[in-house]
Image (spheres, rainbow, N blue to C red):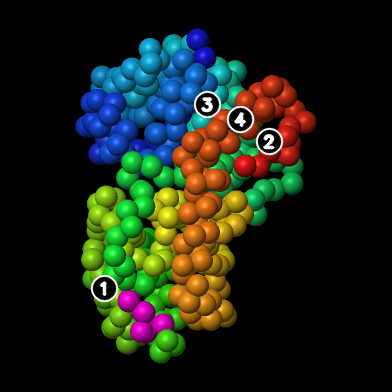
Amino acid sequence: MKSFWLFRSNIRNLEYYHKFKDLETFETKCHDYYMLFPIWLLRNNYFDEVVIWRLANKVRPDIIFDINGKKFIQRWVRNFVQILKYPSPEISLFRGGFREYDNITKLHPEHLGTKLYLGTGRRTYPLYGGNYDCILQEDEQDFRPGHKCIPFYKTASPYIFKNDNLDIKWDICWPCNFSQIRYKGQEEFIKTISKYPSLQKLRIVHCGNKPEAGQKMCKKYGVNNIEFLGWQTREDLCNILNQSKFGLCMSNRQDGCPRIITEILMTKTPMILSEKTRLLPLYKKNGVVEVNEKNIEKKILWAMENQSDLKFQVMHVINNMISFDKICKKNIEMWKKLQLNNNHNFSTADIPLF
């Protein structure tokens, strides 16, 4: 039996999607690409079984979905050592870069098949001496000499984030949480708006938690053209993006590759993106306007004047390059090639671009 294992987190609390007990609800309501990708792998016959490993303080029953006779299993253990009683997988993907992952890969690397590491933020590379066959990176700038790295491509749920052609209400939709103020670029952007009367004329809507922190920051810099809607469901965020000319992401290098990027693009909304933000070049080809502190006013005004062309470009990219199907296939074909080469002499040039 060909198995794929995903180690999703060291967080022991249940996620909202664990309450979904049927496949259709799970697939249409879950926003998490890392949970939807394994379903795609089963549907497209790459594996016979998928196991999503999570930690728990007490025993929880498995959640099992049947996909064309194949099993998608969400399974909880008190310690990852408990996985050793199950047959080995072909591939294990470790998402998040947590200490518990490194520990199990050091103790029992032979039981985990091809071991792929996908960290985030300061854990872009393993911090605790883990034993992995390959490091996945969401920005090629993070590739380091002496490490086997390949790109990791991601996208967003096509059931939640889609284009609905709604009437435009805002110029810019800015989704970010003010609880993550160290690396989402909030103060930098608000301060920039205060410097340019032209940017103060834009209709900007913010979606995310702690809106009072944003309002306080706006008061500090004399900015009054940002409407704060607070936290939104992902379905509501999709509607707001569809009513906006552009999405905005101002994350710095301390952030991982923000999930919001692909969520914006999947609604076929063009994007204004900080040059500091982690992102593979593939996603920057069309419909993305990169800005820095020196050119941000000029580029945003240019983007507003060329919104129709940028909208067409991002629609082309989604349809032809970074659709859900194409991104999933890109990842697994690279990993299969890695296996066939016995983890040696592998080059991403062996996998053609779309």
* Residue drawn 74% across the image and 46% down it: 145
- Label 3 secondary element: strand
Dots 2, 4 in contact, CB < 8 A: yes
Horizontal relation, residue 177 to residue 124: left or right: left
Instruction: Find disc 1 in the rendering and name its residue.
Output: 227
What range of the chain is rendered magenta?
Answer: 199-203
Structural crowding at the residue carrying mark 2, measured as other residues with C-alpha within 10 Å and reported as few (<14), some (14–19) or many (≥20): few
Q: Is residue 181 visible?
A: no
Look at label 1 and name its amino acid. Glu
Instruction: Find disc 4 in the rendering and name its residue.
Output: 333
Look at label 2 and name its amino acid. Ile
Among the two numbered marks 2 and 1 on one chain, the one whose residue lies closer to the N terminus: 1
Q: Is residue 200 visible?
A: yes
Q: Viewer-nearest of labels 1 and 3? A: 1
Q: Spatial distance from mark 1 to mark 3, Cα to Cα?
A: 43 Å
Dots 4, 1 in contact, CB < 8 A: no
Instruction: Find disc 2 in the rendering and name its residue.
Output: 351
Look at label 3 and name its amino acid. Ser
Q: Spatial distance from mark 3 to mark 2, Cα to Cα?
A: 20 Å
Q: Spatial distance from mark 4 to mark 1, Cα to Cα?
A: 43 Å
- Label 4 secondary element: helix
Q: Spatial distance from mark 2 to mark 4, Cα to Cα?
A: 7 Å
Instruction: Find disc 3 in the rendering and name its residue.
Output: 92
